[in-house]
Image: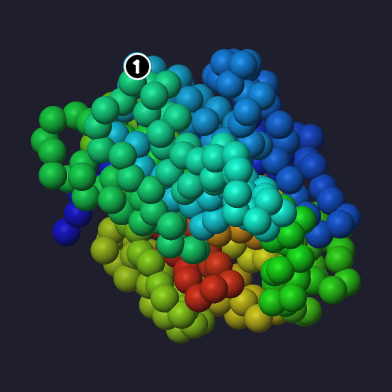
Amino acid sequence: MMQPVYISSAAAISPQHSFDAPALLTDVVSSNNGKLYVQDADYTKFINPVAIRRMSRMLKTGISAGMRAVQLAGIDKPDGIITGTGRGSMRDMELFLGDMIRLKEEALNPTYFIQSTYNSINGWLAMQTKCTGYNQTYVHRGHSLEMALLDAQMLLNENSTPQTYLVGSFDEMTEDYFLVKSKAKYWKKNIPNSLQLLQHNDTDGTIGGEGAAFFTITNSAANSICSIAQLQLLQEPTTETVQASINNTLAAEGLQLKDIDLVLCGMSGDARYQPLYTPILQNTTAHTTVAAFKHLCGEYDTATGFALWLATKLFQTQITPQVLIQKKGINPEIRHILLVNHYPQGTATVVLLKQYK
């Protein structure tokens, strides 16, 4: 049985004002076009202005979120860097393929290709932190970040000496990507305002999103925000298997459902996946608050990263903004958070987080 690991810092660049905002979700961003794009930060705080000119938006957001997480942790460099992404830098890949066709595979500028590789953000973060340790990128659709977290957990469980890994995720949305996914029936035909997304769970589809989130994960409990006590991954999830995973997660920690102060759900307003969350809404007692997050970040492969960042903020502030709440509970403190998420290509995740005091 693996031992828990601890989150000592978290940073996110998302469609909301999540990067160094003075308060949590006080100025909520919404959209009427079915797309939620990240709110740009001051990237020059973490990246040389000369280098920024040659960088794609995804590189800038990923590097800045990662460097901010390192800064918040109060460390000079991590022992390793592990990331997860479902799509990498889509824009650079599209530009490179477009040039390849337009120039008939001759005289191609390699910049777009270099920046489109899935591990380009890892390389930049390693150079900026001077980290020469373990460096890995996972590309595993809806489980990309989760695989990175599992890798970090296994590495930290193998070491008795204190170590810290920078673990994160990043995905971007482009117009071409949105169009392709539209043909695959990912998005709603009749697009609601994003803040009303969850009230339209009787029709298929959701809205698109993007974001980058990074965390410093350590095997030392000192100065941590919370622990990742349990992490379970499901393939081709059903209502029954998700509920069984939740029960197994609670049983492994000797908890009951009433002990969970908040359940953070990945409900996306898509009628095809709403049944995964119906038992949670029905079975949670009056003690537990049920909250949702995808109407704030949209759907993308690594939306779990936004949810995990949000959970750390809920632990730190002990306040659940009204925009998140689907069902209000009476527990006065937030000590245990159960994160349940899915991705349309047949994956789901159950994570149990415990506040560290």
> Could you tell me if residue 277 is visible in this image?
no
Task: Report the coloring of the rendering.
Answer: rainbow
Left-right relation of 71 to 75: right
Would you place residue 165 above or below residue 70 in this image? below
Q: Residue at x 39, y 53 (%)?
A: 138
Would you place residue 263 above or below residue 135 in this image? below
Residue 169 image point, x, y percent: 49, 46
> Could you tell me if residue 55 is visible in this image?
yes
Q: Name the image quarter holding the N terminus.
A: bottom left
Q: Residue at x 43, y 57 (%)?
A: 139
Q: Which quadrant holds residue 26?
A: top right
Residue 241 image point, x, y percent: 42, 80
Would you place residue 70 above or below residue 134 in this image? above
Q: Which residue is mark 1?
A: 76
Q: Name the image quarter holding the C terminus.
A: top left
Foreground: 310 or 76? 76
Residue 33 image point, x, y percent: 86, 57
Q: Residue at x 53, y 67 (%)?
A: 342
Secondary structure under the numbered disc 1 in the rendered image: loop
**Amino acid type, callout 1:** Asp
Foreground: 199 or 129? 129
Left-right relation of 356 to 237: left
Residue 66 image point, x, y percent: 48, 31
Foreground: 349 or 209? 209
